[in-house]
Image: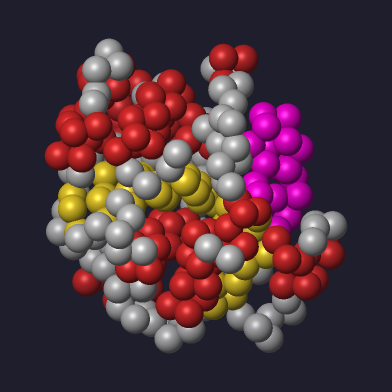
Amino acid sequence: MSEHFIFHGIDNKVGVTMVALSVAESVAERLPEKRVLFLALNGRESMDYVREGAESIDALKSRLESRLLGEDELIAHCLRLKNLSVLGGIANEEEERYYMPEASAFLLDVAGRAFDIIVTDSGSRLDNGLAFGALSYDANRFLVLTQQETALARWEKRKGLYERLGVMPKAYILNNYIEKDIYPADYVARRFAEDGRRFYCVRFVQGGRQAEIERKSLWAGAADGFTGDIAALAGALTGGDAGEFAPRKRRRPWKSFI
């Protein structure tokens, strides 16, 4: 059984794509014998940090709807970067509403047979079919936040909705983390009434705009601090503390959601 890790943001400015892609790159580098897949299932193409230009999911839409997509076809459609494969999201964002949660479930079923480790960027919207289907697939969910009051307050406001939908995160990532901020990690954990061990911090580094210009992740750019934090997170997912994030039997609650 493949391992599947999903990254979801509390809003669209917390850096979900950068964190998820960097984790996928780190995992692939750490485990060169494993077949790793990065998926963008969030209503956007999300290839801003992939210079090679991966294919989008658009060309697979009919194959997903008809349930005819096979493992070899999926592998061939992905961009291959050594043992890391990349599949971009929806290139034509005007058609995002035509993708249902079932498409994500089927795609992840196929990917689970073709790859050993799957890292999914599910964006920040629960009303996107692909994103909600991915979030509902299993329990290895990571919620990406920042130390900004707006982000923390938004999670407090929306937590009940995530609970009702059965898509609560397994752990939290404080991205762009600043140690001397007025809201350190231990404060955030107390505020959310959560165990501090469920929080991972990814330090703020300069270079985000340069990464966009050069179309590469901060991991590929070897940003100080960031790479160490991402490597620690990747290690927790795939070894050491990985038992806490072992795959769970997936649920499909979206019939009452749509």
Tell me: 8 left or right of 31.
Answer: right
Q: Answer yes or no: is residue 173 visible.
A: no
In the picture shown, does residue 74 fall above or below 196?
above
Which quadrant: the N terminus? Answer: top left
- Can you say whether 66 is above or below 208 in the image? above
**Secondary structure that dominates the magenta span:** helix
In the image, taking residue 14 as reference, residue 256 lies left or right, namely right
Q: Quadrant location of residue 69?
A: top left
Measuring from the top left, give residue 71's x and y in whole percent: 24, 32
| Residue 63 colored in magenta in the image | no
Q: Which residues are magenta?
A: 150-170
Q: Position of residue 247 (x, y in %)?
A: 56, 42
Number of marks in the rendered image: 0
In this view, 63 is above or below 85: above
- The quarter in which the C terminus is drawn is top right
Is residue 153 found inside the magenta-colored segment of the image?
A: yes
- Colour scheme of the picture: secondary structure
Q: How far from the left and from the top, in percent, is residue 114?
A: 30, 38
Q: Is residue 141 above or below residue 107?
A: below
Using the rendered image of the protein, determine whether residue 93 is visible from the camera's viewpoint: yes
Residue 72: x %, y % from top left: 18, 33
Residue 139 left/right relative to 190: left
Q: In the image, what residue occupies the spot 43% across and 57% down?
A: 20
